[in-house]
Amino acid sequence: MGSPAHEAESSNDESPQHEVTVPPFFMGKYPITQAQWRVVATLPQINHELDPDPSRFKEDDRPVEKISWYESVEFCDRLSKHTKQHYRLPSEAEWEYACRAGTTTPFHFGETITPELANYKGNYTYASAPEGEYREETTQVGSFNLANRFGLYDMHGNVWEWCADHWQGGYEGSPTDGSAWIS
């Protein structure tokens, strides 16, 4: 887990790179869509109210956006109660494992990122990649048709991803069992 010191654009909060054993878990194939969010937002409240339509860029198949960590946890709690299955945010270790999908490169598709591979501010470059299109809005989930080796889409760009962990300034002393670092 983490970035090696020699990786382009790595930062101190991504180090030290270290071994983590991640037990089996499930993760959604796509980010949560606005259609999915609306359904769960109508379920009975557990701890927090949920706006059924918090996104700026409207479309059922676009990812939900403009939601807080607390709202994300509430979504998981409501879905868990309704389905009688346990849903939760992944730990940062689980998220990174799922994102990398067995690769050792900065991105599951290789050493660099371009706007042809993911939706992000394409006028900002990564390492020596060229500038590209900045769409200035989210795109439909899976629209790049580029799943990683685990079959997961949109692991880079489009929207921020929430994890169960509290923010830390680096990985010194982090759990090595794949659990969320919440102390």
Image (cartoon, rainbow, N blue to C red):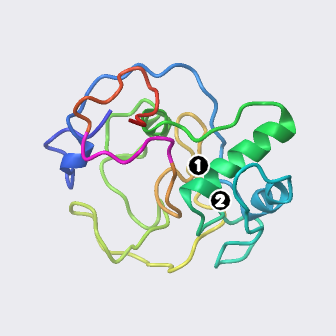
On-image quarter of the C terminus: top left
Vertical placement of 13 versus 137: above or below?
above
For the residue pair 144 and 99, the one nearer the viewer reads as 99
Judge from the rendering whether residue 65 lies leftward or rightward of residue 180; answer left or right: right
Real-space CA distance between mark 1 and mark 2, rounded to the nearest whole angstrom: 7 Å
Say what secondary structure mark 2 lies in. Answer: loop
Residue at x 39%, y 73% (from the top left corner): 122
Residue at x 61%, y 67% (from the top left corner): 65
Vertical placement of 138 versus 159: above or below?
below
Q: Which mark is residue 141?
A: 2
Q: Indicate the amino acid at tag 2.
A: Val
Q: Which mark is residue 153?
A: 1
For the residue pair 48 and 167, the one nearer the viewer reads as 48
Q: Indicate the amino acid at tag 1.
A: Tyr
What are the residue bounds of the magenta stretch? 163-170
Quarter holding residue 35: bottom right
- The crowd level at tag 2 (other Cα within 10 Å; few <14, some 14-19, many 20+) is many
Q: Is residue 116 magenta?
A: no
Q: How would you classify the magenta stretch by its main secondary structure? A: loop
Residue at x 66%, y 42% (from the top left corner): 28
Residue at x 61%, y 69% (from the top left corner): 139
On-image quarter of the N terminus: top left
